[in-house]
Image: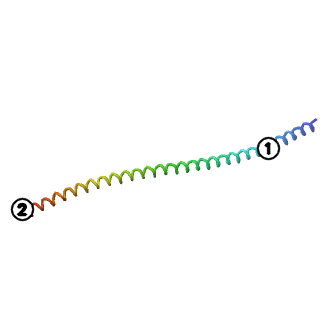
Amino acid sequence: MLADNLKQILSAEHEANQLKLIILNKSKDSIEQTKANGEKAITEARARAEHEIEQLKKVADQKAMEAASELASSTANRLATMHARSEKRMEMVAERIFERIRSV
């Protein structure tokens, strides 16, 4: 009977060790799968972020171009206004010079 009990204990220990190995292997597989899933999620997040950055750059470039165009248009309008004023003043100066020459 003692021998039977000893065999049962040894058998139970052997089964426990086998279960430990199975659990250890499953844990390793689970950890590897989790790491792979995490790396995949990081890669996907990076790709989405890079795409979003490209979209934001395009929007920013477009807004900058619109602002530059607006500024150029505004500058051209101011330049035309200043040119018209200077032409008008030049005509007035020319008339005054002509009047002075004629009155001499």
Q: Residue furthest left?
A: 104
- 12 or 42: nearer the eye? 42
* Horizontal side of residue 33 vs 85, given as left or right: right
Which of the two residues, 67 or 97, is positioned nearer the viewer here?
A: 97
Give the mark toward the camera: 2 or 1.
2
Residue type indicated by callout 2? Ser
Q: Which mark is residue 103?
A: 2
State the residue at coordinates (49%, 51%): 58
Residue at coordinates 15% horizontally, 59% vertically from top-left? 93
Q: Mark 2 touching mark 1, by CB under 8 A? A: no
Residue 96: % across, % down: 12, 59
Expressed as whole percent of the image width and height from the top left, the position of residue 23 reads 77, 42
- Callout 2: few (<14), some (14-19), or many (20+) C-alpha neighbours within 10 Å? few
- Kindly give the residue lying farthest to the top in the view shown: 1
Of the 4 image quadrants, the one containing the C terminus is bottom left
Q: Disc 1 marks which residue?
A: 22
Q: Which mark is residue 102?
A: none
